[in-house]
Structures are given as structure tokens and as C-alpha cells.
Amino acid sequence: QVQLVESGGGLVQPGGSLRLSCAASGFTFSSSLMSWHRQASGKERELVASISSVGGSTSYANSVKGRFTISRDNAKNMVYLQMNSLKPEDTAIYYCKKNGLRSYWGQGTQVTVSS
């Protein structure tokens, strides 16, 4: 079955960095559009970044452009989100998503940006 397992979240000070990882299994990863989303407390889930199946095309929410970088390693079935210059407003649960005719979500990883 499809599994998406996020890791790498934690507590970081403003201005710091974190790298989130998502381990995928149970589907043809190299053919799948992947994305990262986040949901802050009391807010709707929002798209943060997406990456095409071969990684040649990426897109970002305006709020993270220039600070976050999405990447993938199709040989390892992994997708990453490098987050730099973190701000308190980046605090949220971050989710990995497999896009397609049927979408799947990971369980999420908490990112807290606070001094």
C-alpha cells in the first residue's frame, strides 16, 4: 500500500534552517508529482511547494519563495524540503503528498519556529 513518512521536523529559532524528508513506498514514485503542504493551528492546509516527476519543474507559494527548496531523489524514493530563514509564521504541521488520480498524504511532521 502507499506509504508516505515525513521526518525532520522540530523546534528551531527564527532565521534557522530545517530539512524535511518524505520516504515514499507502494507506488511508482518516479512517475508521481509530489508536493509539500502545511497546516497551521486554526488555519486551512496550504500548498507550500511542488515538484514534477523528474524534478525538472518546481513551484512555490509566494510566502516561501527564495527561502524553501523542494527536491527529490527518484533512486531513493525520497522528496525533501529545505527550509531556510525560517519565520515564526512557518510554524505548522508539514505534510508530504502524492498527487494523481488518487492522492495520498503522510502523517505530517511538526515544525515550530520560536525563540
Image (cartoon, helix red, strand yellow):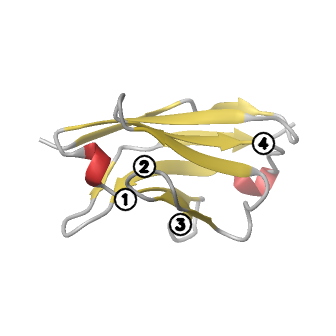
Tell me the element at label 2.
strand
Check disc 4: other Cα within 10 Å, few if <14, some if 14-19, many if 20+: some
Check disc 2: other Cα within 10 Å, few if <14, some if 14-19, many if 20+: many
Q: Which disc is residue 96 wearing? A: 2
Disc 2 residue type (three-letter): Cys
Disc 3 residue type (three-letter): Leu
Tell me the element at label 1.
loop
From mark 3 to mark 4, how far is it between C-alphas? 17 Å
Q: Which disc is residue 33 wearing? A: 1
| Image x and y of residue 56, in percent | 51, 56
From mark 2 to mark 4, how far is it between C-alphas? 18 Å
The residue beneath circle 4 is 84
From mark 2 to mark 3, how far is it between C-alphas? 10 Å
Task: Choose between 38 and 98: the one closer to the eye.
Answer: 98
Disc 1 residue type (three-letter): Leu
From mark 1 to mark 2, how far is it between C-alphas? 11 Å
In the rendered image of this protein, does residue 59 appear above or below residue 86?
below
Check disc 1: other Cα within 10 Å, few if <14, some if 14-19, many if 20+: some
Task: Choose between 97 and 13: the one closer to the eye.
Answer: 97
Residue 62, quarter of the rendered image:
bottom right
| Image x and y of residue 88, in percent | 80, 51
The residue beneath circle 3 is 47
Q: Which disc is residue 69 wearing? A: none
**Nearer the N terminus, badge 2 or badge 4?**
4
Are circles 2 and 3 on residues that touch, CB within 8 Å?
no
30 lies left or right of 49: left
Are circles 3 and 4 on residues that touch, CB within 8 Å?
no
**Nearer the N terminus, badge 1 or badge 2?**
1
Of the residues tagged 1 and 2, which is closer to the observer? Answer: 1
Are circles 2 and 4 on residues that touch, CB within 8 Å?
no
Residue 41, quarter of the rendered image:
bottom right
**Nearer the N terminus, badge 3 or badge 4?**
3
